[in-house]
Amino acid sequence: MMIRKNVLIGIIVFLVLGFIISFVKNAEAVEATKAEIFYDDFESGVDNWHLQQGWSVISEDGNQVLQGTQHTFAAVYLDGVANKLELKLKLLQGSIHLNIRSKATPVGLNRYFIGLNKDSSYINKQLGNNFQHLKNGEGISLNEWHNIKIEIINNRLNVFSDNNLVISVQDENFLQEGGISFETHENSAAYIDDVKVETSVPETRELKAQDVFPDGKHKGDLTLEGRDFLALENGKFEQFGNIYLKGKSKLIIRDSTFKITRYQRLLNHWKIRLEDSASLEIENSKLLPGGSKEGPTLFVIEAANRAKVNMTNSPTKIHLFTMTGNAEAVIENSEIIGDIGGLVGVFNDADVKIINSKVGAVNLHIPNGAIFEASGLGTGFFEKWNLYENAKVSGVSYDITLINTELVKDTIGPGPYERGWPVFIDSGAHVKIKDSELRKVVITLRDEKAEFANFSLETPMNFNYRNISLENVKVMGQWGIFLHGSSDVIVRDSDAFWTFIFDDSKLTLINTHMNEFDPRNFRGEMIFENSRWDTAAEILENNNFTMSGSLEIGNIGGFSWEDSKITRIYEVIGKPNTELILRKEEETIWQGKSDANGKASFSIKFEDSTFNDDFELEDSLGRKIEVTFFSATPLNLGENIISKFISKMKRLPPPPPQMKFIILIGIFGVAAIIFLFWKKRFNFGYAETSHTRKTLCSIYLHSP
């Protein structure tokens, strides 16, 4: 009996302790966030909003209200997770979606959208491209103001109109992230006012540098989120991997040397990436790329959404410094110049100011429908240069200003390097550039068929395509064609060509030198005819395409491969009617026979784990040739030893500058020894010959 009693007491104690622990954990979870209120009556502008075309602030009876008239979105910039939305709504015609827990993803929005019109209401859920209808409810009357409230309590979403519950639904897999936005439909019009949003935001969490960077180093990607705060001060720090700043997190690098170094993956670019409302402050510090046995690192800083970057009194070797979305950056008394980089890029609605500084390059992007006209672009010192003051521009939303800033002279030579003015033009833009020196000219095509020829470098030339006109423009580094959709493009007789290629596009290069190749989600075809590829490549992000034709691949110093498949078709030249066999070590991969002209072909599909594999092709005469992903095509089984040696030497990486100097001194030394040897031999022979001639002459003169 006593044993049963003790067991019962033990069970009760266990349950009580479990309840207490659970309560404490829940309390800690609750304490980790706090509530914030956002309110806007639109009397002071729309700085807190991202308004697409069709949304604007208008006056109704002396009161400022937000108006939507097209099938577009109005989104507010918020921290944290939206729990309650209150607003005044006047629906004039059509319908509107009020979105809560709305968050963009790579495949679409995640959100709950509450549809309201005069006949009905409904709640739907969207997960990327997947839409789920949850429940229907009553509509609202037109042309009068309604007080709308949307609240989330646990796993239930309630919608009220004028204090009346019009629709309610429970979702067991409730969305846990996102803010709010509004979406009017076609042939619709709505007024919105007095928007109030209640969000839960994380408490500020200060991270200690000595904990995150023990001995000054951190290995593996580092993510700061919520309101995380990390200050790296008065030291030397090295990050092996990327840094991601999300939410309203903040990273400070002050009075320090900071390196970012590639780690475990075959990638060139390693970054500090800011999203949401994160911020980065760099003050009186050196930012440098780290080195590793896999190769050098290209240091990137990129910011999106409403992120902010401030850099002061800091010499850096950043390769790319890119602002997108509504990001903002101020660079003052600093340098952004890498050995082959130093590009400041601005896109979308971002804003960048560069003051009393020195940078390697400034990117210009001209989107479809935009107008851009400029002349005299070049490197040098700019007392003041502004996109809208120094060029004729419309349809471009970003801004960039240089004040007492130097754009360093472009002497780096041809290649995928960052100097001067790289210009990226969507094919539907209206562009006129005259009498300028540009680093790169890139045209982006979508579902277009086109042919280009005679791209050349470092010489003034004219170029015209659709409404794009370049007159007396010198391109120093690269010409690029970026392909999307089902584009079909031929490029002939060109130098220093670069492509980003996507989707089901087809690209044919004829007598062309490609010095950078960047396929992404590419499922199409690359065809080469007497062409060459070297210098750089990033084969990333779900590629599965074919390569065929006559191609020589030289040294690719910056090479990345991840999540990709390439089927390479190899043509073979050999003796007619000869048996052929392809092996990987002892395994037979393919067997075939050359035709009456000595030709044959086979293919190898390379993946992440096999692109560095070696194969051997042998014919029935015993002739062999090495086959790799980087082999020149066609494969020539009749190639002699010297040709094979030269071909292999071309694929070797160039020696470092120190080794080049040693080799040069060695060559001069050997040349000097050979010269002295032959000089000595020549002088001896000359002296001997002269003596013989004198002797013969003497005999002749004294003979009887």
Image (spheres, rainbow, N blue to C red):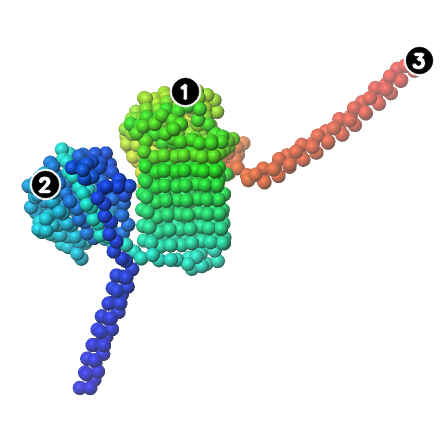
Please name the residue shown 32% across and 47% down the image: 277
The label on residue 471 is 1
Secondary structure beneath label 1: strand
Report the front residue among 440 and 3. Answer: 440
Disc 2 versus disc 1: distance between alpha carbons?
58 Å
Image quadrant occupied by the N terminus: bottom left
Q: Position of residue 184 (x, y in %)?
A: 17, 38
The residue lying furthest to the right in this view is: 704
Tell me the kind of residue under disc 3: Pro
The label on residue 704 is 3
Tell me the kind of residue under disc 1: Glu
Q: Which residue is mark 2?
A: 144
Crowding around mark 1 (Cα neighbors within 10 Å: few <14, some 14 to 19, many 20+) is some
Q: Is residue 211 visible?
A: yes
Question: Residue 205 appears in which quarter of the rendering?
Answer: bottom left
Q: Position of residue 607 (x, y in %)?
A: 36, 42
Disc 1 versus disc 3: distance between alpha carbons?
89 Å
Q: Earlier in the sequence, mark 2 or mark 1?
A: 2
Question: Residue 683 appears in which quarter of the rendering?
Answer: top right
Report whether 607 appears left or right of 642: left
Secondary structure beneath label 2: loop
Please name the residue shown 47% across and 40% down the image: 336
Image quadrant occupied by the C terminus: top right
Tell me the kind of residue under disc 2: Glu
Crowding around mark 2 (Cα neighbors within 10 Å: few <14, some 14 to 19, many 20+) is few
Q: Position of residue 311 (x, y in %)?
A: 44, 44
Crowding around mark 3 (Cα neighbors within 10 Å: few <14, some 14 to 19, many 20+) is few
Vertical comparison of 19 with 470: above or below: below
Vertical comparison of 173 with 74: above or below: below
Report the front residue among 602 and 380. Answer: 380
Q: Nearer the viewer, mark 2 or mark 1?
A: 2
Q: Earlier in the sequence, mark 3 or mark 2?
A: 2
